[in-house]
Image (spheres, helix red, strand yellow):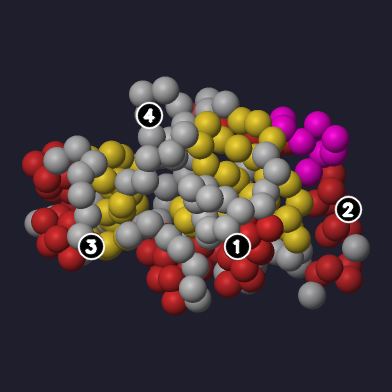
Amino acid sequence: KTIPTIKTWDICSSKYYCDQLFKSNGLRTPKTIPITYSDDAERAVKDGGLKFPLILKSSSGSQTGVGVIIAESMRSLHATVQMLSFLKPYVDLLVQEYIEIDYDIRVLVVNGEVLASMKRNVMDDDIRSNASLGAKTESIELTDIEKETAIKVSELVDGDLVGVDLLPAKDREKEQPYILEVNGTPGLGGIEEVTKDKSVTQEILKIYMNRENWS
């Protein structure tokens, strides 16, 4: 038994593939368009109907918020894409709709059930909310629709243990959240700090010490 499986690792390694997978299954994601070459930024923005500021990110390989940039204008976006393409030809870049939020939600789904969740506050003078970068975290009670969305995401990526990052809807009780991304190898440090009543790491070990959960 390996966690993640090769299949889950492969799916989660492409943010664009995940975006298309979730959209095709009726889930809500920010508008996301791939950039295919160094002078493709203007086409991508136009095709996506995107407005500045917007997010520029790598489709694969980024972690802990590294590789996520906010672009304020076409001029800065174009220059950044050209530089990244110069440094790494065929780099897989995405432009994405910027949805302004005060916080996002990390949901830890294990063996088809929500084990824990946390609210990650966006850092001052930044757009990121990664606990590993110093963002303040706190516990949060999920709505039914947020739980259902996170579990469906884990099923679509065939994930035994995944971290699902959600952007809360304006009406959390009635509207689907946006799926920002899914992490096939989620860090547990931040979520351990906010789940004072239990150790999520110990709970995960208990689940997978039971070989009935290895299928």
**On the rendered structure, is 210 left or right of 6?**
right
Whichever of labels 4 and 2 marks the residue nearer the N terminus, that label is: 4
Who's the residue at 38% across and 34% down the image?
127
Whichever of labels 3 and 4 marks the residue nearer the N terminus, that label is: 3
- Nearer the observer, 45 or 210: 45
Q: Mark 4 to mark 2: distance in Å?
A: 37 Å
Q: Which residues are magenta?
A: 193-200
Q: Mark 3 to mark 4: distance in Å?
A: 24 Å
Mark 4: secondary structure: loop
Residue to which mark 3 is pinned = 48
**On the rendered structure, is 10 left or right of 148?**
left
At label 1, the amino acid type is Thr
At label 4, the amino acid type is Asp
Whichever of labels 4 and 1 marks the residue nearer the N terminus, that label is: 4
Residue to which mark 1 is pinned = 149
Q: Mark 4 to mark 1: distance in Å?
A: 27 Å
At label 3, the amino acid type is Gly
Q: Does residue 116 sit above or below 11 in this rendering? A: above
Q: Which mark is residue 4?
A: none
Residue to which mark 4 is pinned = 126
